[in-house]
Amino acid sequence: MDVKGVLGTISFDGEWVTITKTPVGQSPAPVRLRAAEITGTRFKPASRLFHGYVQFLLPGSIAAGENGGLAHGGRPPYSDPHSLSIPRRSNDGAEKLVAAVERARN
């Protein structure tokens, strides 16, 4: 299950969540998270004006907060390795991915 985000993708194979961000000029640096270790998820659907996001919460790490302002639209910063911004067309796929991760963690 793959979701195309803004400058990256999120993949889930039933056990591992892989967030691959594609920064300009650098090679992709994937972050792998075991679904059983994820303590929570945050999903904010994108609207016509602003991108949404998917964020995974892990034990012992502090979740990056949402940045304010028009440029960020209430999303975690790009530097947060456990989140990815999503466009509006990816809302359905992201919702299904979050639901699948929630089922796998229980």
Image (tube, rainbow, N blue to C red):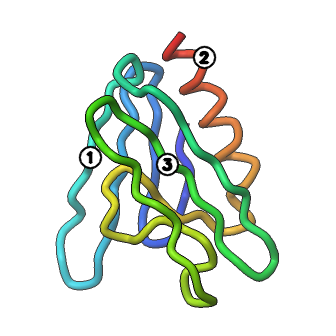
Distance in Å between CA atoms under marks 1 and 3? 12 Å
Q: Which residue is mark 3?
A: 55
Query: Would you call the spot at circle 2 few (<14 residues within 10 Å), some (14-19), or many (20 or more)?
Result: few
Residue drawn 18% across and 76% down?
26
Q: Which residue is mark 2?
A: 103
Contact? badges 3 and 2 (CB < 8 Å): no
Quadrant containing the C terminus in the rendered view: top right
Residue drawn 61% across and 71% down?
74
The numbered dot on residue 31 is 1
Residue drawn 39% across and 17% down?
36
Q: Residue furthest right?
A: 48
Distance in Å between CA atoms under marks 3 and 2? 16 Å
Q: Nearer the viewer, residue 95 or 65?
A: 65
Quadrant containing the N terminus in the rendered view: top right
Q: Amino acid at mark 2?
A: Arg
Q: Residue furthest top?
A: 106
Q: Nearer the viewer, residue 58 or 23?
A: 58
Residue 71 position (above or below residue 43): below
- Residue 104 position, x and y percent, is 52, 16
